[in-house]
Every structure is written in C-alpha cells, then in structure tokens.
Image (spheres, rainbow, N blue to C red):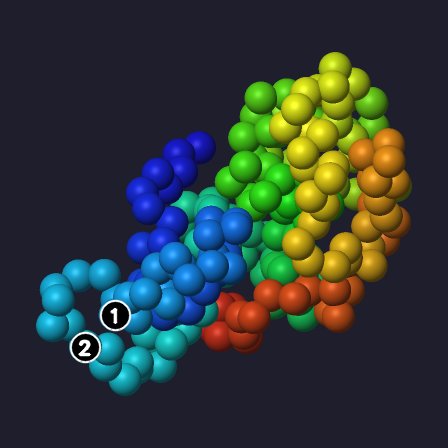
Amino acid sequence: MGRYTGPSCRLCRQVGEKLFLKAERCYTPKCAVDKRRKAPGAAKQQRRRLSDYGLRQREKQKLRYTFGLLEKQFAGYVREAQSQPGITGQYLFQLLERRLDNVVFRLGFGENRHQARQFISHGHIWCNGHKVDIPSFIVKVGDAITWKPQSKEEEFVKARQQAGPRQQLPGWLSLDRGAMEAKVTALPKAEDLDLKMDPRLIVEFYSR
C-alpha cells in the first residue's frame, strides 16, 4: 500500500486548519497554518466559498489526512461502514480509531500516527504476545498492546515512556505506564471520538 510522502504541513494548509500531523511542531509558533493562512498554490490565491460538494470533499479529506490514508484505502473503510447496521459515520470513525497505528498513537507510544506506523512496521509493537507489523491491523476488545521486550531497553522507547500521550487517554483503552503495556477494554464510543469532522458529510460524499 502506497502512502503520501510530501510535506505534512501542506495538507493542513489545504484544508485550512490544523490536523496535528507534525506532533510537537503543531503546538508551536512554527506551525505552517499559523504562519501561512493561505492554501498552497499561487501567492494571490484566495479561498472561495465552498460549494456543497466542496464542503463534503473537505470533510472527507480532513479525516483521510488525519489517519494518513490514500483514497482507495479510505474508500474501502467507507464501504465496510456502509455494509454494517447502525449509523454509518459512527462505525467509520470507530473502525479508524481501532487501527493499530492509531491505538499506538493514542497510547503515547508514538508522537504522531506517522511515527507510530514506523514503530509497527519495524516490529517494535506486539499484540497479544506476537509481533504485528501491519499498521492497519484492527484491534479487538481484550487485545493487549505492548512494546517488543527487547525494544523496551531502547532509548527512544524510554523517551516515549517519560513523555506520555499529549492528549487524555481514551476511555476504551487502559495503560500501565510503568510496564508500557496497554489493553483494549471496550469499543470506542461516540464520546471517545474527539475527531472534529462531520461524519454525515463524509457519508454523503460517497453516497452521491
């Protein structure tokens, strides 16, 4: 599966708001969204009022960029959500939240989802006592997430242990910070999803 390798700040400027893709930099005055309000492109380019289609597309792009997914992969998640009973948008958010790279980020094991994805791909993360090197792996209730035993002695792991997550730990995850071990205690609920996108607009974009 390919991935976007361009500048992360360009994506935030494209949608006109912070998506916190660069970890620490996003919280400083160096943030590109704070320094350059205009969208990337021509210097004199001005933002126009979005059409209904443009509004739905922007919401879709915001969610897709946040999780670092390409269009084909993201559309697959939408189709899976549409095939499930219940509220499609809520199930879509829940499905994305349960991706292993997102769980590793939520636990504070990675500064952002990109770094979490690297740790997983390099074999540093274990699930239920076994190495899982697939960032898109969907966790289930009862799954235990931890670092590879040998990796716990690495300096970058100790640094993440001291730093901890920047945001509050979601209610559906539990974490033993001393042992750097976590467990999925429940499925994400609506109140656990702190994503600032409108799921209704995203579903409408793919239902047109």
**Residue 155 placement: quadrant:** top right
Q: Where residue 43 sits in the image (x, y, percent)?
A: 13, 67
Q: Where residue 131 sits in the image (x, y, percent)?
A: 71, 21
- Above-or-below relation of 60 to 65: below
Instruction: Give the residue displayed 15% in from the left and 72% down from the top.
Output: 45
Report the amino acid beneath label 1: Lys
Residue underneath mark 2: 46
Report the amino acid beneath label 2: Gln
**Residue 11 placement: quadrant:** bottom left
Q: Which residue reaches farthest bottom?
A: 49
Between 6 and 136, which is closer to the camera in this rendering? Answer: 6
Report helix, strand or loop for mark 1: loop
Residue underneath mark 1: 38
- Above-or-below relation of 133 to 192: above
Q: Which residue reaches farthest top?
A: 150
Direction from residue 41 to residue 208 in the image, left or right = right
Q: Residues within 10 Å of mark 1 (few under 14, many from 20)?
A: some
Q: Where residue 9 sits in the image (x, y, percent)?
A: 36, 54
**Sequence-first tag of 2 and 1:** 1
